[in-house]
Amino acid sequence: METFIAILILFPFLAALVQAFIKSNSLRRISVYISSAAIIVATIVFAIMNFGKEQYLVSDKLIIGGSSLTGTVNYIMLAVEFILMGIITYLSFKYRKYYAAVLSIVQTAFVAWLELSGRAHATGFYMFCDNLTLILCLMIAVVGGLICVYAVGYLKDYHHHHGDEVKDRRSFFCAMLFVFLGAMFGIVFSSNLIWMYFFWEITSVVSFLLIGYTKTEEAVNNSFRALWMNLLGGVGFAAAIGFAAIGFHITNLQDLVALSDPAVVIPLICLALAALTKSAQLPFSRWLMGAMVAPTPSSALLHSATMVKAGIYLLIRIAPAMTGNLVGLTVALIGGFTFFVASIRAIIHTDGKKVLAYSTISNLGLIVACCGVGINETIWAAIFLMMFHCVSKSLLFQTVGSVEHTSGSRNIEDMHGLIKRYPALATAMTIGIAGMYLAPFGMLISKWSALQAFVDAGNIILVLLLAFGSATTLFYWTKWISKLLAYARPTIRRKDTTSLDQWVSIGGHTVMMVALCLVFPFLSGSLVTPIVNSLYGTKDFKPVLSDENLYILILMIIILALVLVAGFIITRLVKTKQTSVYMSGIDTGDERHYVGAFDEERTMYHANWYLSDLIGTDRLMNVATAVAAAGLIIGAVLTIGGVL
Amino acid sequence: MTVLRIVSAIIYILLGGLVAGLLAGIDRKFSARMQGRRGPSVFQPFYDVAKLFSKETLALNHGQFVIAFSFLILMILTGALFFAGVDILLVFLALSTAAMFLVFAATSSNSAMSTMGAQREMMQMLAYEPMVLITAVGFYMSTQIMNGGKGSFKIIDIASGDIPSIVYLPGIFLGFLFILTIKFRKSPFDISTSHHAHQELVKGVTTDLSGRNLGMIEVAHWYENTFLLGVVALFFLSNDWWSIPLAIAAAVVVYFIETIIDNVSARVKWELMVKLAWGVTIVCGGLNLLVLEYIF
């Protein structure tokens, strides 16, 4: 068991090492396929073997070769932390961003002091594995593994398009993707806070390196923004370890959550700070927007299976301890506020990736709000939102990336009539978007449960934020889909140049998306409900969604499918006369030009509404950031002040 | 009970369209009389739709039929679920999904008028959606108060309380009436399409639909209207027998109030619509929820 986990964590690092030294493209392709397949298969086997079990693993008693295993591992981790600190310090001096070095040195020195002085001597177990861990593992392995496959095909196109502008560092890029997967496995298996912190720091540094991939000025600036925000979260994490270790002699997450001391809110708010930075909540949202400069596979990875989900994972773990206290209230309100503001912000962008990024921030806000409320119903919703968001967001990033390469633009306006030009890509993208917000797909169902749970928790502010945020969410997704589905006759026909590697991943994701919706009741009953029971120590938790509703939803899926099929059949049978578009003027023949009032030929162009004159200013975001920062500081001060 | 629920859903599927079609006919008669005209027969809407189905259908593409057909079926399904008394949130979510198909029907045509109409239709959804969700939450909280703690979103539970839920939800009722004008596509909010094909966007979302495709959209709107009046009636239902005639009377009165508003107001711009709708939602809906949470 311990060995299996060690393999799961270490194998991606090993694969990364292999990637780092492969210079040949065809060899890289083969090795990425093999590594990803191995990770996916191993994780599935592991999940099946340990399904439904709750296991505490690895204690100080584990002796290998005469010395304590954990002691050795601790020293190795400490050494690696110092190496990471060295890298950050070197790069921040190189690019004159000294603040990053300061943040890094402070936290690394603090944690090293805790460990070396014996203050953080571990109590209890180092690792923990239950259904929640398994869900995260499956997400990381399957979605993350497929993204690595996608990356191989994508990067080939990418360097083909960018020529000499960007230095070809493909081996480095692929290596970093695998390091990311390894670090994520580390986070979800760790129970010991210092171990978790170690992997947490790795994800911060790796995301920093991935964002800076192109080394342009913009990329460097954005990568340092991501770095300092995440390092600030790291400082929070280190502070939490310090409080827990010195104040309660606890270094273990599970013990910390179970602690009934009122002062536990201090380490909790520090951990919440770390989670909020990782999950790009206001006031820390800007790093995720900046992360868009990196090649698409890294965005897909950061937004779906890894990075932002690390924050969510931590929040779900500490949620039972946040129920009904000030920490929970602060987190819930920041999440709800972020959900609403980011969904408004998503309306104004024409750049597909930006819309996706704001939608990520917004959806994460909803999940964070669920965790902050911290009752069993909201955690059920949070876990489902996390799963559905992971798959559909990954699918969307990949399709946007492929559309960009094949059509030359990722602007939503340019996706007009995509269904006619690239039917397969447009269909995959439509399924991805539908998965994000339409009934009867899972995301909406989970949102609905969240609404119900917020009412039960009596938080009217959250109910209002959710109601308004849902409306804005509806708006930006609907206008995107309606662009894709416009039946415009293409002016230029181009071949779909999406490579096989990309299709393997996009196809896999599309199938997963649909499958998740169909097995929803099963997932709820056998996987998620037990998690909620174990987190809250209950036996009879029932999700807010009744069985009747689940059956109706399945009925709806069937009816919708039948209607669409019937529609397609009938439309072939009945006689319909083909006509041309009504233009309020004479069509000059191609449905794109018409004769205007002054008898001259004019071009017709359909644009979506972006409301940029109403909400397009940066002021909205600046004010929102300031409000959220103030809220966070007030929440933290009241929390800490309340127990001192 | 289950039988009753299924029967009422079936009655809705059979008669739901006819009721709203007839109401539309009376509406036209009533409006004509207000304007000093004689007006058409009350059955005129049925003649119109029959004519649409008998005409040759002109379509821009095959997709139009599929989308219009899906819109119709989903709308009937939404109403049927409502009259079967299931979870009201589920019904509202089905309603938004159905409404999405009207937008797609318009934008898939790739026509300027339809596309502009679709953008406005989305704006209307943006305006009314928050109030719709808050209405569902309001019903839930009123059952919570009536049952002493345990709330329910099920329509059958909402309709069988001790007193009509309007007693607890006057603000939410007003807010719902406000967005009902948007949903009925009546002036001053007939922004995406109107009953008259002489607005600046021709006929908005339905400009490029004709024949049977347009007929299906029209019938779907009838079903939608009956369902919406059902929601109005739900505010007045309780476990007393007299609540049923009261609810029906309320729905009829509301419909005619909407007709009068339609006749006495001019169309506003969408900016004003969104601001008004959201303002009313916050003031009427939000306050009502806060009162329910903290006073009862």
Image: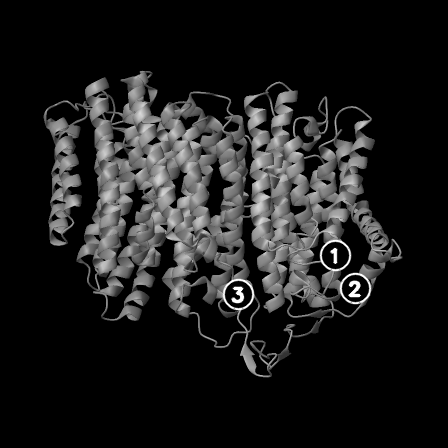
Residue A57: mark in rendering:
none
Q: Is residue A461 left or right of residue A643?
A: right
Percent of width and height locating residue B71: 67, 54
Same chain, labels 1 and 3: no
Residue indicated by mark 2: B52
**What amino acid is found at the position of numbered circle 1 in the picture?**
Glu
The image quarter containing residue B159 is top right
Q: Are discs 1 and 2 less than 8 Å apart at CB?
A: yes
Position of residue A431 relative to residue A368, above or below, is below
Position of residue A176 relative to residue B117, above or below, is above
C-alpha separation, residue under disc 3 versus residue under disc 2: 29 Å
Residue indicated by mark 1: B218
Which residue corresponds to the image point at 57% horizontal and 31% vertical from the top-left?
A: B287
Q: What chain does badge 3 belong to?
A: A
Q: Are discs 3 and 2 less than 8 Å apart at CB?
A: no
Q: Residues within 10 Å of mark 3 (few under 14, many from 20)?
A: many
Secondary structure, mark 3, is: helix
Residue found at the very far bottom of the displayed protein = A599
Percent of width and height locating residue A80: 14, 40
Q: Is residue A213 visible?
A: no
Residue indicated by mark 3: A419
Q: Earlier in the sequence, mark 1 or mark 2?
A: 2
Q: Is residue A165 left or right of residue B229?
A: left
Q: Nearer the viewer, residue B116 or A546?
A: B116
Percent of width and height locating residue A166: 23, 65
Secondary structure, mark 2, is: helix
How many labels, in total?
3
**What amino acid is found at the position of numbered circle 3 in the picture?**
Ile
Q: Is residue A125 left or right of residue B2?
A: left
Q: Nearer the viewer, residue A327 or A555?
A: A327
Secondary structure, mark 1, is: helix
Q: Nearer the viewer, mark 1 or mark 3?
A: 1
